[in-house]
Image: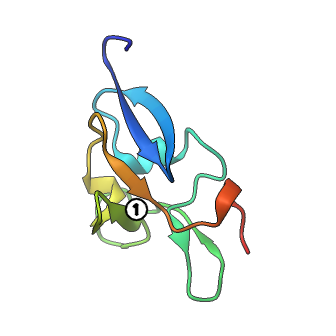
Amino acid sequence: MKPGSVQILLDGLPLRVPAGTSVAAALAFRAPGCARLSVSGEARAPFCGMGICQECRLSIDGQRRLACQTLCSDGLRVDTGLPAGGQNP
């Protein structure tokens, strides 16, 4: 493990990010950078970055949380709910 970094599981795949990175920022490290799909199937990404817009809510360690308000830590499990490969259905 590199010093100053943590490893999370993003949709079941390991992703190493710098320590102190928010989950919202970590999404940008892997395409397509989306937090979830809307009810109509459109990709939704973090928008405001401070917890007001709710666009970055997703499953973090099995609970619905805001990605912009959650820091990455070793072993954190993030599930966007996107189909395999991160593509829209």
Which colouring convention does the figure follow?
Answer: rainbow
Q: In this view, does 12 lie to the left or right of 31?
A: left
In the image shown, does 2 or 42 lie closer to the viewer?
2
Residue marked by disc 1: 48
Position of residue 85 relative to residue 41, above or below, is: above
Q: Where is residue 17 in the image (x, y as percent from the top left)?
A: 42, 29
Q: Quadrant of the C terminus?
A: bottom right
Mark 1 residue element:
loop
Position of residue 55 relative to residue 71, above or below, is: below
CA neighbours of label 1 inside 10 A, class few (<14), some (14 to 19), many (20+): few
Q: How many labels does the image show?
A: 1
Q: Where is residue 76 in the image (x, y as percent from the top left)?
A: 31, 45
Q: In which quarter of the image is the N terminus?
A: top left
In the image shown, does 47 or 87 lie closer to the viewer?
87
Disc 1 residue type (three-letter): Cys
Q: In this view, does 83 lie to the left or right of 12?
A: right
Residue at point 31%, 39% (across, down): 75
Residue furthest toward the top?
3
Residue at point 60%, 42% (across, down): 30
Position of residue 82 relative to residue 2, above or below, is: below
Q: In which quarter of the image is residue 64?
A: bottom left
Q: In which quarter of the image is residue 86?
A: bottom right
Q: Is residue 37 left or right of residue 22?
A: right
Residue furthest toward the front?
12
Residue at point 29%, 59% (across, down): 50
Residue at point 72%, 62% (across, down): 87
In the image shown, does 8 or 46 lie closer to the viewer?
8
Q: Position of residue 85 (x, y in %)?
A: 69, 55
Q: Position of residue 34 (x, y in %)?
A: 57, 59
